[in-house]
Image (cartoon, grey):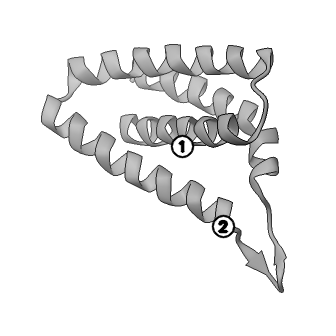
Amino acid sequence: MIYITILVIFIYFKIARVHKKEEKLTSFWKVQHLIVLTLTLVTYIYAFNHMSWYVLLLVSLISFVLAAMLITAVQLGIFVDGKPLFGMHTVYKNTQYLTLLLCFLSVMVWLT
């Protein structure tokens, strides 16, 4: 569960980085970033207490690379019959669900 949570955290921060470059940062996004930052700190505190530091470093590095490749693939476009399946605008609209997923995963990590 902790590995999936770390991967989703990196996916969120990659989306946030791309959003910051392309769109205007609103108060909604600032609050959402603060929530995810808090969840990240809580998750990494748990990980440092229950995992070896070198395993956590390796998991974080692999998750960072996977998140970068996933978001880059969406930025370049996933096409079906010459039309984009979905773009970054769709991803931006659904980030609140990603934040809720992170809340759920963080709670589940601490409860297990």
User: Which x, y percent locates residue 64?
Assistant: 40, 46
Identify residue for label 1.
11
Dot 2 alpha-carbon crowd within 10 angstroms: few under 14, some 14 to 19, many 20 or more = few
Q: Nearer the viewer, residue 109 or 33?
A: 33
Q: Residue at x 81, y 71 (%)?
A: 84
Residue 93, x across and y down, in percent: 82, 40
Residue in the image at 39% along x and 47% along y? 63
Q: Is residue 85 visible?
A: yes
Identify residue type, mark 2: Leu
Please give the residue where the numbered disc 2 appears in the rendered image: 76
**Residue 52 shows in this picture:** no
**Residue 67 pos. (x, y %):** 48, 50
Query: Residue 42, position in %: x, y?
Result: 42, 14
Label 1 secondary element: helix
State the SS at label 2. Answer: helix
The quadrant holding residue 58 is top left
> Which disc number belongs to residue 62?
none
* Number of the front mark, 1 or 2: 2
